Image (cartoon, helix red, strand yellow):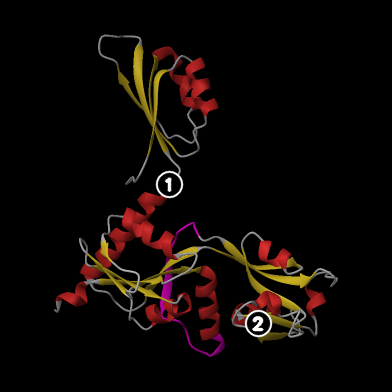
Amino acid sequence: MDHSEQRIKIAVQKTGRLTNHSVDLLERCGLKVTKSKDQLICYGENMPIDLLLVRDDDIPGLVSDDVCDLGIVGLNVVEEKRLQEEQKGSKGMFKQIFELDFGHCRLSIAAPENVPYDGPRSLENTRIATSYVGLLTDYLKKNDINAEPVFFSGAVEIAPKLGRADFICDLVSSGGTLRANGLTEVAELLQSEAVVIQTLAPLGDAKQALVDKIIQRLDGVLKVRDSKYIMLHAPRAALAQIRELLPGSEAPTVMPLEGSDDRIAIHAVCRENVFWETLENLKAAGASSLLVLPVEKMLA
């Protein structure tokens, strides 16, 4: 088989809110790439993995058509593509395999501040501007609402001011853009985050093993993203109290200190924030020589 056929192709958003996070996460999983600002493909130097930098709306299609093996994209884009395919009577040839816990936002309906809203019935016989026609149509159908989705490809929030729509349906993060345009969020359709999708086409044993390794590494990086490794000395008698004070920790490693029968060394991975108050409480319980280190990755 040609060597290029053994390489994993991952579609990643070329520019946007997910781009830097996606590439940084893959690099933290050990991937080194050759890239430049005008490149559409980044070649893996140390692993048979290539990144295709494309529009986010194109990612589900590239994975579905088996042009790419994996894609990193917002759940909002995945669900919109899936519903579009269903509404055409077909099915997208991809599956969601991993949640990445970044790029959080929500797809919501918003109303002009002077327009009263009293539940979904307030949308009856209105026009709603959106670039997510599939998701909006599905929401209206499930709530038995007769309203007209109006496709708007950009700057959806200005549609009411232009007289093109009565409401809008768009992605919301902080809500600042809505407020700046005199809009109020009134209904949530979908909570979104970045996810990994995979083609349904068979990959073969070698490529599937590499995909599994990538997912394992992603999991190892994300699990300890905010974790800290704590090392300290303490009286053996204080072990129970110190274990209670260690935030989000599994059973710590306990080792005897050379030349001391009543003192021990304690090492623990804490999966919650370690504040100064935490260290002060540990010291008050008898701990000394406290050291806190960041955790880069971990395999369970």
Query: Which amino acid lies under the numbered mark 1 shown in the image of this protein?
Result: Arg
Q: Quadrant of residue 120?
A: bottom right
Please state which of residues 133 and 157 is positioned toward the viewer in this rendering: 157
Q: Quadrant of the C terminus?
A: top left
Residue matched to label 1? 225
Q: Is residue 48 above or below residue 272?
A: below
Query: Which amino acid lies under the numbered mark 2 shown in the image of this protein?
Result: Thr
Residue 97 on the magenta segment? yes
Q: Quadrant of the N terminus?
A: bottom left
Secondary structure, mark 2, is: helix
Residue matched to label 2? 137
Q: Quadrant of residue 207?
A: bottom left
Residue 75 image offset from top left, x and y in percent: 51, 69
Residue for point 80% across, 85% down: 125
Please state which of residues 164 and 11 is positioned toward the viewer in this rendering: 164
Q: How much space separates mark 1 and mark 2, taking CA atoms?
A: 37 Å
Residue 107 image offset from top left, x and y in percent: 63, 69
Q: What mark, if any, has residue 68 been given in the picture?
A: none
> In the image, which residues are magenta?
86-102
Badge 2: few (under 14), some or many (20 or more) residues near its Cα, within 10 Å? some
